[in-house]
Image (cartoon, rainbow, N blue to C red):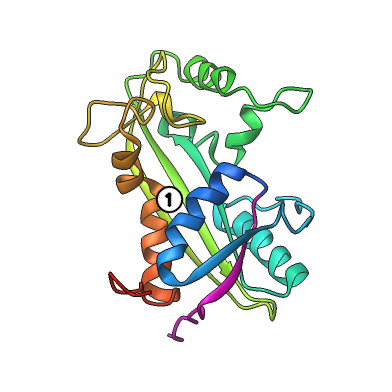
């Protein structure tokens, strides 16, 4: 098996136009000597996400940003899946929350999950995050993380975003919408995917006290 390609310290593009996600990922990458610039700040277009997998859609975004910017790029694709719905909404997670005018309404999406699931005894659900790091020459590395638990309705909590208020991770009593953000970030699907990416592809973290 070929060795993973490691990123050198420097600038990296985050293939996102979401300011909150940019801040979150920039904080994760900073200890590795990486400076994040967003695709939005560079004025890069958002490519169509035409794949049927999280990894496939993250790859599309990362490769498009890397080639357009001439820099390494990181992209993520994530979503919420419910067992009794055959894994839906899955890669259509955002679509379920999109109104005809293009705005997002996750309360509507969570109500739709509950409506379709009905009174099913099977409450298993999970979040998935795929992270892809790509280079301008077309090389890419991909990693996935999942967190399993159960769905609840009505939603609980005002923290987090998306489907967080209807998901209770295994071993916990609070939903992601009720949970302290630091705890959520420590056990989340994105944290697990990022840990794998960091272990295989990122520069070592700077030692405490390094300038």
Classify the position of the C terminus by image quarter.
bottom left
Please give the name of the residue rendered at 64% of the width and 63% of the height, measured from the top-left corner: 62
Please give the name of the residue rendered at 70% of the width and 50% of the height, measured from the top-left corner: 49
Rendering coords of residue 163 (x, y %): 48, 29
Give 124 or 34, whichever is nearer the viewer. 34
Magenta region: 1-16
Query: How many numbered marks are there?
Result: 1
Residue 45 lies left or right of residue 190; in this view the side is right
| 171 relative to 3, above or below | above
For mark 1, give the secondary structure. Answer: helix
Classify the position of the N terminus by image quarter.
bottom left
| 128 relative to 118, above or below | below
| 60 relative to 149, above or below | below
Residue 147 colored magenta?
no
Residue 3 colored magenta?
yes
Rendering coords of residue 120 (x, y %): 38, 18
Please give the name of the residue rendered at 41% of the width and 27% of the height, measured from the top-left corner: 159
Residue 108 lies left or right of residue 179; in this view the side is right
The part of the image, by quadrant, that contains residue 72 is bottom right
In the image as oriented, which residue stretches furthest toward the bottom?
A: 2
Rendering coords of residue 99 (x, y %): 71, 22
Most common SS among magenta residues: loop
Please give the name of the residue rendered at 75% of the width and 51% of the height, measured from the top-left corner: 46
The part of the image, by quadrant, that contains residue 144 is bottom left
Would you call the spot at circle 1 few (<14 residues within 10 Å), some (14-19), or many (20 or more)?
A: many
> Which residue corresponds to mark 1?
190
């Amino acid at each position: 098996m070929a060795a993973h390609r490691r990123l050198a310290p420097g600038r990296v593009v985050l293939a996102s136009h979401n300011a909150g996600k940019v801040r979150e990922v920039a904080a994760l990458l900073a200890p590795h000597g990486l400076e994040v610039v967003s695709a939005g700040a560079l004025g890069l277009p958002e490519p169509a996400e035409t794949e049927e997998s999280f990894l496939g859609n993250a790859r599309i975004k990362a490769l498009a940003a890397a080639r357009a910017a001439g820099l390494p790029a990181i992209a993520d694709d994530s979503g919420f899946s419910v067992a009794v719905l055959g894994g839906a909404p899955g890669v259509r997670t955002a679509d379920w929350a999109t109104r005809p005018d293009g705005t997002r309404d996750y309360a509507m999406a969570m109500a739709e999950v509950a409506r379709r699931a009905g009174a099913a005894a099977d409450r298993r659900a999970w979040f998935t995050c795929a992270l892809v790091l790509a280079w301008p020459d077309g090389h890419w590395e991909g990693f996935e993380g999942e967190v399993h638990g159960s769905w609840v309705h009505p939603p609980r909590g005002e923290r987090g975003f998306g489907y967080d208020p209807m998901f209770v991770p295994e071993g916990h009593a609070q939903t992601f919408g009720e949970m302290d953000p630091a705890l959520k970030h420590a056990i989340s699907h994105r944290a697990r995917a990022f840990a794998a990416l960091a272990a295989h592809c990122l520069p070592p973290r700077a030692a405490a006290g390094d300038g």
